Image (cartoon, coloured by chain):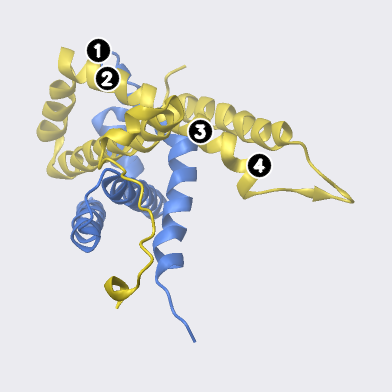
Chain colours: A yellow, B blue
Amino acid sequence: MAEEMSRRPYHREVPKARWVLDHARYMRYMAREATCLFIGAYTLLLVVGIGRLAAGRAEYEAFLDALRSPLSIAFHLVALGFAVYHSVTWFNLTPKALPVQVGEEFLPDRVISGAHYAVWGLLSLAVLFLAGVF
Amino acid sequence: MATSNKPLVWGPFAAGGTITAFLTPALIVLTLLVALGYTPELLAYERLHAFASHWLAKLAIVAVVFLSLWSAAHRLRISCYDLGVRADTLVATIVYVIAGIGTLAVAAWLWGI
């Protein structure tokens, strides 16, 4: 059907994966999407930890010991960087996803993002405090 | 009526994106401290075992694990498509099944605590 038509629309060639490198904006987009690898991997690590906790004291303490390696420290630091990048990009998008109208006006973007940043900070401190870090 | 499974897939993704944005960095700091040789009190065996014994904590852990894994899985699926992997049904099945297995595993293990 389509082949019989005389007009042949122009299809721009898009390289399969190399397009990411064409523009800084695309690279930032992919960096944001890549955060899922680290958040996913870290959550699977937590899943394993819960499994070791359920298995018993010796198994759980062996799990904690296994975390104390240079490779694990490196993984945690990289994962922390990506997780924070996810939080920042996610909260910067909240004014688009949750516009708040007050009367005739919309709340400025920075108020909505700022509220999320504030809650994020307080919640993180609460988690660390309840876990007994300080 | 047109039906779509998009809200079912996207809802947990949005919820998971939000919960990981709020929670994951702090959780990583906790296990980073373990890795550095300083174990926070809550992560000692007795304390964490007692914490995970409460039904509300079990529910919260399963919810956080499910939403985190699901949103990561969904993002990975979309990124695979973006990078030219067009076997979307296969990719979607693999990543969502992994998220499901992780969630079920945590639920089963917590059940036994």
Of A123 and B43, the residue lying toward us:
A123
Regarding mark 2 in the picture, which secondary structure is present there? helix
Chain ID at mark 2: B
Residue shown at 36%/34% (left/top)?
A: A30
Q: Amino acid at mark 2?
A: Val
Q: Residues within 10 Å of mark 2 (few under 14, many from 20)?
A: many
Quick check: can you spot residue B26? no
Chain ID at mark 4: A
Q: Residues within 10 Å of mark 3 (few under 14, many from 20)?
A: some
Chain ID at mark 3: A
Q: Which residue is mark 3?
A: A89
* Mark carried by residue B37: 1
Are labels 3 and 4 assigned to the same chain?
yes
Are labels 3 and 2 assigned to the same chain?
no
Regarding mark 4 in the picture, which secondary structure is present there? helix
| Alpha carbon distance from label 2 to label 4 | 36 Å
Regarding mark 3 in the picture, which secondary structure is present there? helix
| Alpha carbon distance from label 3 to label 1 | 31 Å
Quick check: can you spot residue B66? yes
* Mark carried by residue B34: 2
Q: Amino acid at mark 4?
A: Pro
Regarding mark 1 in the picture, which secondary structure is present there? loop
Residue shown at 42%/57% (left/top)?
A: B12
Q: Amino acid at mark 3?
A: Thr
The answer to whether A11 is drawn above or below residue A84 in the figure is: below
Chain ID at mark 1: B
Q: Tell me if label 3 and label 1 are in contact, CB under 8 Å.
A: no
Q: Which residue is mark 4?
A: A95
